[in-house]
Image: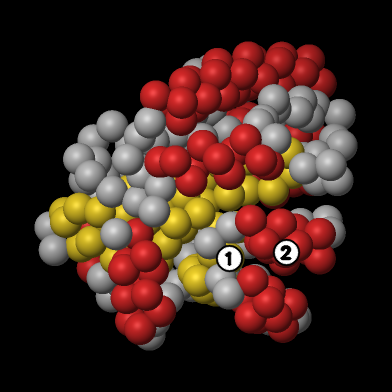
Amino acid sequence: MVAADLHVHTTRSDGSLTLDTLPEVAARAGVDAVAVTDHDRIQPDLSGPVTERSGVTVVHGIELRVETDSQRLDLLGYGVEATDALEAECARIQRNRRERGRRIIERVEDRLGRPIPVEPREGLGRPHVARAIAEVSDYTVQGAFDHLIGDDCPCYVPREVPIFERGRELLAEACGVVGLAHPLRYRDPEAALARCEALDAVERWYPYDGTVDTDPVEAAIDRYDLLPTGGSDAHDDRLGRAGLHAAAWERVRAAIG
């Protein structure tokens, strides 16, 4: 039974939920606690690191993309109390996101030979662009990623992200717990998990398909004495597909402070 879904996106980045609709959706899924972890953005409408909204515990979180020497990773910060440094970095990233979005949209429109119904803005992510492509073409959302805007595809434009050490430092100063998101999704999971030596936690529960071997994550938890976290990585309203049972959630809640 999932008690806490600690990886959820809202319309603050590329999700479909708002802070107002979140409690009802969480209650419907039987989830007691949710971490709002929007991409490279904090939530100005959350008044503290952990709050209550309509009977649901809401953790103020963030998902921050960082660069290593071999690949890009996503860090999850839980219990955000925003610092000036984190706010400044998020603002810089959003300026880059807006410019990157403009360049992707231009490339897509040039390739399709028609406009797509999306505009550059703060918080714009590739899922927004993919959905816009699907509205006006024969591509599905997944097809847009596979053939147009995914990594190494013709319309892809990389983002400018902080290096791992800087991102970890920013989150450590602002958050109670800093962990690695979805470690088995990266090109080199072994190298990703090695980075956990500098972190507090790792996402143990995640909606991978049934063929994924999670033993390397368990080994990293033991090796680096990590808190196991987890969540659905929901960009829609399907909460609770993965997450923490009650005892695991209590450990994370205590560590957030």
Q: Position of residue 172 (x, y in %)?
A: 48, 46
- Is residue 150 placed above or below 91 in the rendered structure? below
Q: Are marks 1 and 2 in contact (CB under 8 Å)?
A: yes
Q: Position of residue 107 (x, y in %)?
A: 77, 18
Q: Quadrant of the C terminus?
A: bottom left
Q: Amino acid at mark 1?
A: Val
For the residue pair 136 and 64, the one nearer the viewer reads as 64
Residue at screen point 66% across, 31% down = 162
Seen in the picture, residue 119 relative to 130 is either above or below; the reply is above
Q: Which residue: 70% across, 27% down?
A: 159
The front one of 160 and 171 is 171
Image quadrant containing the N terminus: bottom left
Q: Is residue 57 left or right of residue 38?
A: left
10 Å crowding of disc 2: few (<14), some (14-19), many (20+): many
Question: Where in the figure is residue 208, as x and y percent of width and height?
Answer: 65, 71
Q: Is residue 1 visible?
A: yes
Residue denoted by label 1: 202
Q: Residue at x 35, y 34 (%)?
A: 82
Instruction: Identify residue for label 2.
Output: 193
Question: Label 1 crowding class (10 Å Cα cut-off): few <14, some 14-19, many 20+?
Answer: many
Please name the residue shown 40% across and 41% down the image: 174
Q: Amino acid at mark 2?
A: Leu
**Inter-mark Cα distance, 1 to 2:** 8 Å
Q: Earlier in the sequence, mark 1 or mark 2?
A: 2
Q: Secondary structure at mark 2?
A: helix
Q: Is residue 240 left or right of residue 59?
A: right
Q: Position of residue 119 (x, y in %)?
A: 53, 17
Q: Which mark is residue 146?
A: none
